[in-house]
C-alpha cells in the first residue's frame, strides 16, 4: 500500500508549483527503482498512466473499468508448495510494478472501502489512507493541510 500512496502522491504542489516525481527520466527511474521496479522508460510510461488512471478512479472522475487496460497480459498462476497454495503473478516485465500497484488499490478497496481518498484541502493534490477507527481523517497531513484549514477557519471566525 505504500507504493500505491507514493504513486498517487508523486505529483505534489510545493511552494505553489506542481512537482512530478516521474516527470523526467532520471527522477522517474530513481522512483521506480526505490519501489522495486527496474526503471526502464517503458515501465516509467506505464507508471505515469497508472497514476493518472488511479487518481481519476479514486477521485470519482472515472470508473474502475478504466484500469482494465493496465491489467492486459496479466495472469496469476497457482503453485502448490510445502507452505500451501501460493499465487504467482505473471506480467510483462515493464508492467510488473504498475500492475502490483493496481492490485494494491483493489486490495485496499476490498479491505478498507472508502478510506483511500483525496485530501480535503482544495489546494492540495495529495491522497490519504484513513486508518482511523472513526474513518474521519480529512487531510493528508494534520501538520500541513489540517493546520492550514484550522487557521483559515479561526481567521474567518475572528474577523
Image: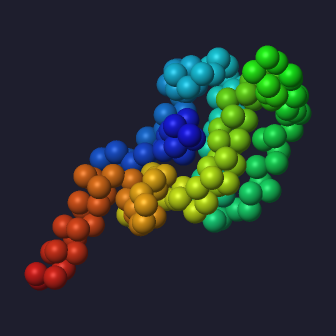
Residue in view at x 77 percent, y 54 percent: 66
Q: Position of residue 101 (x, y in %)?
A: 65, 38
Residue 114: quarter of image: bottom right
Residue 89: quarter of image: top right
In the image, is residue 114 above or below residue 107? below
Viewer-side residue, 92 vs 112: 112
Location of the N terminus by quadrant is top right
Q: Position of residue 67 (x, y in %)?
A: 76, 49
Q: Position of residue 117 (x, y in %)?
A: 52, 59
In the image, is residue 111 above or below residue 159? above
Residue 78: quarter of image: top right
Viewer-side residue, 73 vs 130: 130
Location of the C terminus by quadrant is bottom left
In the image, is residue 55 above or below residue 29? below
Residue in view at x 24 percent, y 62 percent: 148
Viewer-side residue, 104 vs 27: 104
Residue in view at x 74 percent, y 57 percent: 64
Residue in view at x 10 percent, y 81 percent: 158
Q: Is residue 33 left or right of residue 40?
A: left
Q: Position of residue 112 (x, y in %)?
A: 58, 55
Amino acid at each position: 500500500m505504500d507504493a500505491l500512496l507514493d504513486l498517487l502522491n508523486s505529483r505534489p504542489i510545493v511552494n505553489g508549483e506542481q512537482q512530478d516525481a516521474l516527470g523526467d527520466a532520471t527522477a522517474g527511474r530513481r522512483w521506480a527503482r526505490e519501489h522495486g521496479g527496474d526503471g526502464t522508460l517503458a515501465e516509467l510510461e506505464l507508471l505515469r498512466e497508472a497514476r493518472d488512471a488511479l487518481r481519476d478512479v479514486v477521485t470519482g472522475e472515472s470508473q474502475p473499468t478504466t484500469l482494465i487496460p493496465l491489467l492486459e497480459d496479466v495472469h496469476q498462476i497457482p503453485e502448490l508448495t510445502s507452505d500451501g497454495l501460493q499465487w504467482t503473478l505473471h506480467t510483462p516485465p515493464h508492467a510488473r510494478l504498475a500492475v502490483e500497484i493496481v492490485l494494491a488499490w483493489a486490495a485496499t478497496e476490498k479491505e478498507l472501502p472508502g478510506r483511500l481518498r483525496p485530501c480535503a484541502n482544495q489546494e492540495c493534490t495529495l491522497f490519504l489512507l484513513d486508518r482511523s477507527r472513526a474513518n474521519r481523517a480529512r487531510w493528508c497531513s494534520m501538520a500541513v493541510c489540517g493546520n492550514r484549514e484550522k487557521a483559515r477557519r479561526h481567521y474567518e471566525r475572528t474577523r
